[in-house]
Image: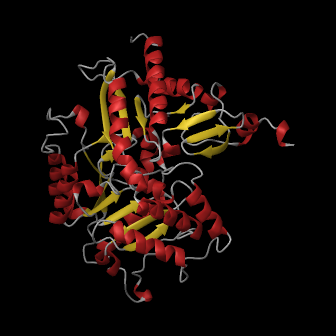
Amino acid sequence: MEKNIDWQKEDLNYIWHPCSQMKDYEKLPPIVIEKGEGINLYDVNGKCYKDVVSSWWCNLLGHCNPEISNALKKQADILEHVIFANFSHKGIIKLSMELAKILPKGLKKFNYSDNGSSSIEMAMKMSFQYFQQTGKPRKIKFMALTDGYHGETIGALSVGACDLYSKIYKPILMDVIHIKAPDCYHCPFNKNRDNCSCECAKFAQESFEKYADETCAILVEPLLQGSAGMRIYPSLYLKKLRQLCDKYDVHLIADEIATGFYRTGKMFACNHADISPDIMCLSKGLTGGYMPFAAVVTTDEIYNAFYDDYLKHKAFMHSHTYSGNPLGASCALAVLDIFKKGEIQEQLKETTPYFNNLIKENFLNLDNVGEVRSIGLINAIELVQDKKEKIHFNSKLRLGYQIYNKALKKGVLLRPLGDVIYFNPPLIIQKQDMDYAVKVARECTVETLKENGFM
């Protein structure tokens, strides 16, 4: 019966895809995937696509990784789910014990959720309630960086600042104090990210001086603002934020949903700055991209503010049906077991510089490439109309979308952020796949620029 099904047609009959204008699907119908292996995805017609964006940054160790798959299968035969209020299971206890060994110092109390946006909501509520219960009821607001992204729920959108996702919802969003974020490519102080003193931290300093007494927490994507175009900023900036938070009694919430588990070259992005946040949010790579799963980790100090008799109403009354799900925990434990072997880390020592240099060699010589930036295996190529003046293209041209479309035809999944072409592949990517993906990305970029009259 399946042989007679037009999968693309039936998809369009029923499915409203995320982060898409469905009218675009008239010219670029949905690509129906049959199976995955390593960095490869295969559609129902057998065509292969190199997934160099890790299927929205979550596929950490390759599609259908045997070790993770086996752990998931084994767990499914033992326990698929159990209520997480007053019940627990061995897998989630083991996972918490293992994560506590590798997390920044002081993070040792775990609350679990089922997706990144929800973990952000949890972190915000924890911080707010903490100050309500410790004699500082005026601390009710949040700070966040401009151009940040923390998820799609109302609270998460409020602390984000990407108009593409949040603009239409502004009438119903929370009132958040937004601090001008570091933007090293357009540095207002004419500095370079590799040798500056993070003069841009003055904007945070000014906001803390003015609003700290009414602020409970600041949320940041450590070192890498993903949806803003893979903007990378120095670790010193993170150190300065930690110092401001300590001075003004404001919680630092680190959104490591996209940056955790060696995405930036270290286990966590916070490790680059050698700082510990008060609350850390984890998801995406936590389960290798297998299961919807998230963790919110905090300190004893915050945890203890909620510890009292139930009738005193200090408990954290935030819950999700799938909190602490055993299937997700089994995948996460498998991911950590793979890292314990050290093979991935050794491979990264060789493949990371190779990939970064390969991209620079292929793109920096193009007149319309303003900057190439890298952290770990993450690489971003910022396309500009005028390299000298750093003037961007008219967004109506949708150059990034044109490049994406061309690359798909050649078997590479890029999915740019506006006119920023980026790579964020599974950590297991090999050099031959890097070579092919970069070759295709350059070809498609050059073709698109020529077709639009810029070369």
Above or below 421: residue 317: below
Q: Position of residue 243 (x, y in %)?
A: 16, 60
x 78%, y 35%: residue = 6
Above or below 248: residue 367: above
Q: Quadrant of residue 327?
A: bottom right
Q: Position of residue 411 (x, y in %)?
A: 57, 30
Residue 50, visible in the rendered structure: yes
Q: Is residue 231 left or right of residue 80?
A: left
Q: Is residue 235 left or right of residue 166?
A: left
Q: Position of residue 282 (x, y in %)?
A: 42, 60
The residue closer to the viewer here, 118 or 196, is 196
Q: Position of residue 280 (x, y in %)?
A: 35, 63
Above or below 377: residue 219: below
Tell me the colour scheme of the image. secondary structure
Above or below 410: residue 426: below
x 41%, y 71%: residue = 98
Instruction: Please identify the quadrant where the N terminus is shown.
Output: top right
| The furthest residue to the right | 1
Q: Quadrant of residue 30?
A: top right
The residue closer to the viewer here, 302 or 135, is 302
The residue closer to the viewer here, 154 or 319, is 319
x 45%, y 13%: residue = 452
Q: Is residue 194 left or right of residue 437?
A: left
The residue closer to the viewer here, 170 or 83, is 83
x 39%, y 12%: residue = 454
What number of labels is visible?
Answer: 0
Q: Quadrant of residue 359?
A: top left
Residue 291, visible in the rendered structure: no
Instruction: Please identify the quadrant where the C terminus is shown.
Output: top left
